[in-house]
Image: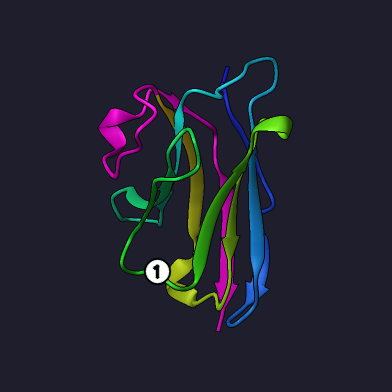
Amino acid sequence: QAQLEESGGGLVQAGDSLRLSCTAPGRTFADYARGWFRQAPGKEREFVAAIGWRGRRLYYADSVKGRFAISRDHAKNTVYLQMSSLKPEDSAVYYCAAETSGLGSTRDEDYSYWGQGTQVTVSS
């Protein structure tokens, strides 16, 4: 059973925005860093964004800088990925993950908990 649950994916047009959410039913990941990764068909899973446990450390892939924003709401036990100016190349399954050090990482091998993913499709 996945420890994390993503939502908010869907089919949008290029230039549109979407907000993904990641919750952790029945468990608090307040001391964990959280990250978003994505995987397109036939490609390796790649890092998108990460946030430290305090919300002060932020990391972004170069491909999404200036367009995506990661944030977290401890009261709601939820992490968000606000995606703007979406491009067809952003189409992928997006995964939420939790990393135990709390500092954040761009490497997927540093994350211990994962969701099952939510599909984002951007049409041109």
Q: Nearer the viewer, residue 53 or 25?
A: 53
Q: Residue at x 65, y 45 (%)?
A: 21
Q: Is residue 103 magenta?
A: yes
Q: Quadrant of residue 106?
A: top left
Which residue corresponds to the image point at 55% horizontal and 84% vertical from the top-left?
124
Residue drawn at x 55%, y 23% as measured from the top left: 29
Identify the image's colour scheme: rainbow, by chain, secondary structure or one colour.
rainbow
Residue 114 x, y percent position in the rendering: 47, 29
Q: Is-magenta flag for residue 123?
A: yes
Q: Quadrant of residue 42?
A: bottom left
Q: What stretch of residues is rendered in magenta?
A: 100-124
51 or 95, which is in the foreground?
A: 51
Q: With 26 as the anchor, is 32 left or right in this view?
A: left
Q: Position of residue 111 (x, y in %)?
A: 35, 29
Q: Which amino acid type is shown beneath numbered disc 1?
A: Lys
Residue 68 position in % (x across, y down): 50, 65
Position of 47 relative to 25 (above/below): below
Q: In what quadrant of the picture does the N terminus appear?
A: top right
What residue is pinned by disc 1?
65
